[in-house]
Amino acid sequence: MKIDTAGAGETVPLRPQTELLAATGRTGHTVGALVSAWLGSYAESADTRAAYARDLREYLAWCTRRSLDPLALRLPEVQMYATELASVPHPRTGRVLAASTRARKLAAVSSWYTFLVRAGVLDANPARDAARPRYDRGHSPTASVSQQQAAAMVTATGQRGHRTLGAEAAAVVVGLLIGLGLRVSEVCQARLSDLGQRDGMRVLTVRMKGGKVRTRPVPAPLAPALDAYLAVRPASDAEALILTLGGAPVNRHQVYRLVQRIAAEAGVPTPKRITPHSMRHTFNTIARERGAALEDRRDALGHSSAAITQLYDHVALSVTRDPAHLVAAATSTPGPAEEPDQGTPHP
């Protein structure tokens, strides 16, 4: 398995990279082979495997730039890596990584080393005791949109064509993200053969993280948009449900750009903060506002615990419900137009 250890904006000499991946441990396996074997253990979750692959790629790039052997490192070197993650701006965004992102990256490195210990390559995991950044697990930085804004996005999707997907495909994508709360990967991985019928309703089989499979209904308002798309879906041998105008399966980057464009067209403030995952939060929040039970929302979203579903509850986090508004109304000085009527003075 070839791994490009160069990160964004980095230039890593080919020879050191090749030497690092070709280095062998005491079992005779190369670093490249050990990475492949570790990633293979996440075969049931393509999203987790892809995220961990990116995280470990960055770690190996860090080792390569410093001529460090990842199989010979100890806790001090891993802690140096953690310190750099917390202090060096990302070359693409120019911002320091969020604590939750840094924690995930360190978890990926530690997971790889744990695998190496189990495989007999190392005696101990050097990342096990590395200090992890603290952050509030009950707070989600993901932006959400209101019910009215979500409706405006659905309306805006069908008002004009889209260069990559076309208006019909774009309408289905937005409908799946908002109307079913699907992950962007679930939209991209949906197959034409996943459409079906059950209990007199049109349904879509959704393949989720961790190998979970859910049969979700196609909501009645989405059905016309789906039919309109299927009528113009490009002829292609691809199994993917959503295809671009060129007949290629849609990818997550195209969906990401589509969501931000639609958010801007619908007048959503700070549309650059709106992502496909924002639509998932929006689905959960609107469902809760409309009375959907926590258990039903958890099952629909495919969460492993109710706590994760509750993290998506932007109703509880809504700034419109903050008690500060009540206190401000009670303590503010009435304006001229709000002064109480003192009656007409007697001459």
Image (spheres, helix red, strand yellow):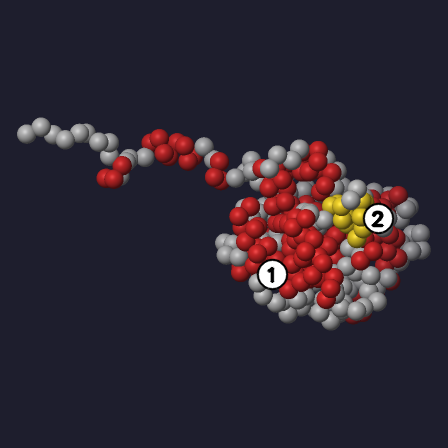
Q: Nearer the viewer, residue 52 or 309?
A: 309
Viewer-nearest of discs 2 and 1: 1
Residue at horizontal 72%, vertical 58%?
227
Q: Nearer the viewer, residue 289 or 128?
A: 289
For disc 2, the marked residue is 44
Total number of numbered labels? Answer: 2
Q: Residues within 10 Å of mark 2 (few under 14, many from 20)?
A: some
Q: The residue under label 1 is which amino acid type?
A: Gly
Asked whether residue 267 is in view, the answer is yes
Judged from this view, the residue extending furthest toward the front is 200
Residue at horizontal 88%, vertical 57%?
33
Q: Quadrant of residue 251?
A: bottom right
Residue at horizontal 56%, vertical 51%?
151
> Dividing the image into 4 quarters, which one contains the C terminus?
top left
Q: The residue under label 2 is which amino acid type?
A: Glu
Q: Residues within 10 Å of mark 1 (few under 14, many from 20)?
A: some
Looking at the picture, how far across and down is residue 70, in whole percent?
Answer: 80, 54
Q: CA distance from mark 2 to mark 1?
A: 35 Å
Residue at horizontal 64%, vertical 70%?
163
Determine whether label 2 and label 1 are within 8 Å by CB: no
Which of the labelled discs sits on residue 158, or is there none?
A: 1
Q: Quadrant of residue 231?
A: bottom right
Image position of 107 with respect to 332: above or below: below
Helix, strand or loop at mark 2: loop
